[in-house]
Amino acid sequence: MKKLFLAVAMLAMTAVTTTVSAQKLLRFGFKGGANLGKLDGTGFQDGFKLGYHLGGFAQLNLVKGFGVQGEVIFSSTKTKTTDNFSDIYKDVSTSDDRKEVKLNYLSIPLLANIDLGTPRLKLQVGPQFGAMVSDRKVFGAANTAFKGGEISGVAGLWLQLPIINVSARYIIGFNDVKGVESVTSTSNWKNQSIQLGVGVTL
């Protein structure tokens, strides 16, 4: 009886260990790639500009087919003002017309991972919280050209290969990041970006 009990116990432990290992409840990794961003607002040229992003992530698989993913990402994009930028906003000069502006953010996405028929392909959705880490005083005598933080929404796909991960996502800003005053325009400044990434999952 004892031998039978021990055999059953060992089989159960082996099954549990195998299940936990297969599910890989907690995984870490890092990723990086292209960041195609633009600042949507009056006074800025339309179109996406090429930048980059780098960071790390942690995945927690809660139940079969669903988990959560947290990331810390540094992203950099560029934008350029229009020819009449100084006519639209106060406290800026003509030297700010056609000026290239670099936007650097430290972002924390908190995403839901939803399997799409297979654990290898996931739909990712959730909020992202960002803090600007570049100089916010970039236009002439403007005290603060940009606000320090933003809240965005994220939607995308994640392909998990045995070690390599590939991701594509669209990010849209919800809040106005404009810090300068406007004379002729009350439009908001909102960030948008497309991120294409490749990384390693440990």
Image (cartoon, grey):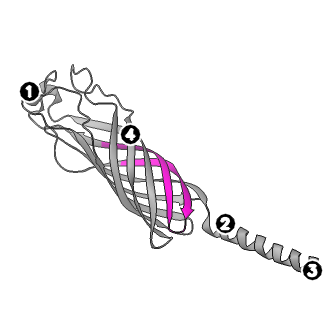
Residue in the foreground of this view, choosing between 179 and 166: 179
For numbered disc 2, what is the local secondary structure? helix
Name the amino acid, label 1: Val
Alpha carbon of mark 4 to alpha carbon of mark 3: how far? 61 Å
**Range drawn in magenta:** 52-77
Specify the farthest residue to the right.
2
Mark 2 or mark 4: which is in front? 2
For numbered disc 1, what is the local secondary structure? loop
Name the amino acid, label 4: Gly
Alpha carbon of mark 2 to alpha carbon of mark 4: how far? 34 Å
For numbered disc 3, what is the local secondary structure? loop
Name the amino acid, label 3: Met
Residue that badge 4 annotates: 130
Picture coordinates of residue 5 (x, y %)? 87, 76
* Residue 182 figure quarter: top left
| Mark before the other along the chain sequence, 2 or 4 | 2
Label 4: how many Cα within 10 Å (few below 14, some 14–19, many 20+): many
Residue in the foreground of this view, choosing between 97 and 180: 180
Alpha carbon of mark 1 to alpha carbon of mark 3: how far? 88 Å
Residue 19's label in the rendered image is: none
* Residue 77 figure quarter: top left
Mark 3 or mark 2: which is in front? 3
Residue 1's label in the rendered image is: 3
Is label 2 in contact with label 1 (beta carbons under 8 Å)? no
Residue 20's label in the rendered image is: 2
- In the image, taking residue 63 as reference, residue 4 lies left or right, namely right
Mark 2 or mark 1: which is in front? 2
Is label 1 in contact with label 3 (beta carbons under 8 Å)? no
Mark 4 or mark 3: which is in front? 3
Label 1: how many Cα within 10 Å (few below 14, some 14–19, many 20+): few
| Mark before the other along the chain sequence, 4 or 3 | 3
Residue at image coords 27%, 24%: 144
